[in-house]
Amino acid sequence: MKTARLSAFLLVAGLLSACAGPNVVEAPVNLGNFKMGHNIVVADNPQKVPISREADPKDWDDSLTAAIQTRLGRYDGDKFYNLGVSVDAYALAPPGIPLVISPKSVVVVTATVWDDETGKKLNDKGEQFTVFEGLDGETMIGSGLTRTAEQQMEKLSFNAAKRIERWLSDHPEWFALPAKPVEVVASTK
């Protein structure tokens, strides 16, 4: 009976890991006249959750800068916008006991956007995001067992850049596009 359960588990884990591909960058969303200007990432003193693996702030800076450039550097609008992102906190999952103690990795970042031409900040207050690795065949049993700290940072940076892109798309008025319509919730009274 134990062998059958173990075999079933390994089969499911194998299938899930086969479905988990590399970081895939989808087609760009409509960001109007957006063109990446300065891509500034600051990871001077991020808070590390006590259970986390160690990570050099310079590695966070490099990883997140590269992910943002890959994600947002592909837009070819006619107006430059500058992006400032700080790495506020992180937890890189250490190895644990599979399926019992399988911590997940997370990063907390804050983003701000400036109009390069006017030097005006577009969001009054930095927008903070808590970003997780996501669930796939490797993270199901705990990414601390299946990924190095560098691989976890790369995945978190990819997901953070994707989340920042989605946030930018939620504000089309910043990029000379019509504002998104306000959703009206019908009353049930």
Image (cartoon, rainbow, N blue to C red):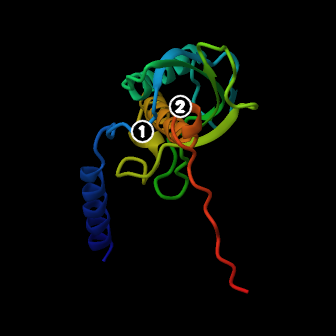
Disc sitting over residue 175 in the figure: 2
Q: Element type at marker 2? A: helix
Q: Residues within 10 Å of mark 2 (few under 14, many from 20)?
A: many
Residue 176 drawn above or below residue 118: below
Give amino acid for label 2: Phe
Q: Element type at marker 1? A: loop
Q: Residue furthest bottom?
A: 189
Residue 157 drawn above or below residue 6: above
Is residue 63 visible in the rendered structure shown here? Answer: yes
Quickly name the residue at label 1.
30
Residue, x 40% and y 40% (percent of image)?
A: 29
What whole-number distance in Å separates the C-alpha atoms at marks 2 and 1?
A: 9 Å
Residue, x 53% and y 43% (percent of image)?
A: 178
Name the spot of residue 115 as percent of width and height, x first: 61, 20
The answer to whether 27 appears left or right of 35 in the picture is left
Give amino acid for label 1: Asn
Name the spot of residue 78 as percent of width and height, x first: 43, 19
Residue 64 drawn above or below residue 99: above
Residue, x 75% and y 32% (percent of image)?
A: 125
Disc sitting over residue 7 in the figure: none
Q: Earlier in the sequence, mark 2 or mark 1?
A: 1
Residue placed most toward the observer, 61 or 150? 61
